[in-house]
Image (tube, helix red, strand yellow):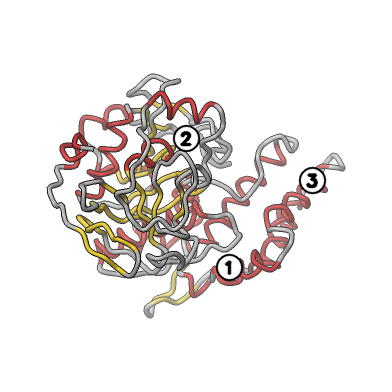
Amino acid sequence: MAKYFTLFSLCIITNCALAQNIVPTTIKELPAGTVKFQGGTNTCWSFSTTSMIETQLIQSDNENIDISEIYTSRNMFIEKAKRYILSGGTTLFEAGALSHDALFGIQKYGAIPNEFYPREKAVAFSMRSKIQLDEILKNYLDSVLKNKPINPNWLAGFIKKHDDIVGVPPEKFTWHGKEYTPITFEQEVLKFNPDDYVTITSFTHHPFYKNFALEIPDNFLMAEPYLNVPLDELINIAGSTIQKGYPLTVDMDVSNNGWNTGNSGYALFEGTRFHNVADPDTSEMAYSPGLRQQLFETLETQDDHLIHVVGIAKSKSGKLFFILKDSMGIRGPFQGHDYISINYFGINALAITIPKKALDPKYLPMVNTTPGRGL
């Protein structure tokens, strides 16, 4: 791990203990709102990206705003539904998506504080229903496609189907004494531009320092440009983003061996799944670009979960960890925060989304920010 001391320019080697779990020493941690629970909504992409935006608002305006994740997921359901209908049901329609979808959705539709369109109703439905919202909506779309020409008012019916379950968002709301629409709230409070962000990955089946659409199911538009860099550079960019004081999200496989954050708080790159490991200095397998590529191409590494990265920590022996704020809720020994080793990250982090301001200027000419989005 010595090479990553150089990459991150880190030099703190201490540790502390909490109950039965040895806690790595925090080197850098960004301010963030409270841990939220996504339930069974499968909208981690919205929860993590919203949390990233909330952190930036805390930093820039000292304003801790709880933004509705469900409003963004609602609007991306609408975008997916339009494509699904026009494709005759051949495109992907499910709850999953990625950070760039949330960023696009906030720009196009605006945003709402959670108090006016609360996540709690959607989460409660997801926890009690045997059929999830995306399946209900897809069944509706499939019924529309059975008769051609289709009903020209199908979209109104689709939105009603969604809102009957989750709730109707307000067209206007009063926040801090001023009236807003979702669009004016985005423009005046969030001051948001999705082109201020870039998504970065590392795979060898495409050339480095070029852009491509990563072939994963949740990249449903297959249009978003990912900047492809060597693996060490991907890890370095993630670490330096936090060191510079910027948040990021990571698209992560959380079902491979070694992910046991609910039990131990840690994800370590292990050959077998372990339980209740309290020592971050547990030995790990080595990672490499070749193994990473193999596990991706054999579909062992999948885009399971999108998580907000809020910090970096170091174990007693000097192993580096990313600190994640996880929308699976307040669980595990670290109350909804996960410690992800560099080795686990190197194999299982499919991509990161970061503010462009955090990126070394040498990469900026390589960044393509003109994907085909929306309808």
Residue 7, percent from left and from top: 19, 37
Instruction: Tell which of 123 and 263 is nearer to you.
Output: 263
For marks 3 and 1 on the same chain, the one whose residue lies earlier in the sequence: 3
Q: Amino acid at mark 3?
A: Asp
Q: Which residue is mark 3?
A: 142
Q: CA distance from mark 1 to mark 2?
A: 28 Å
Residue 77, percent from left and from top: 62, 51
Residue 235, percent from left and from top: 30, 38
Q: Are the residues tagged 3 and 1 within 8 Å (C-beta)?
A: no
Q: Which residue is mark 1?
A: 169
Q: CA distance from mark 3 to mark 1?
A: 25 Å
Dot 1: what SS?
A: loop
The residue under the point 73% across, 49% down is 138
Q: Are the residues tagged 2 and 3 within 8 Å (C-beta)?
A: no
Q: Horizontal placement of 95 versus 240: left or right?
A: right
Residue 159, percent from left and from top: 68, 58
Q: Quadrant of the C terminus?
A: top right
Mark sitting on residue 224: 2
Q: Horizontal placement of 169 versus 7: left or right?
A: right
Q: Amino acid at mark 1?
A: Pro
Q: Amino acid at mark 2?
A: Glu
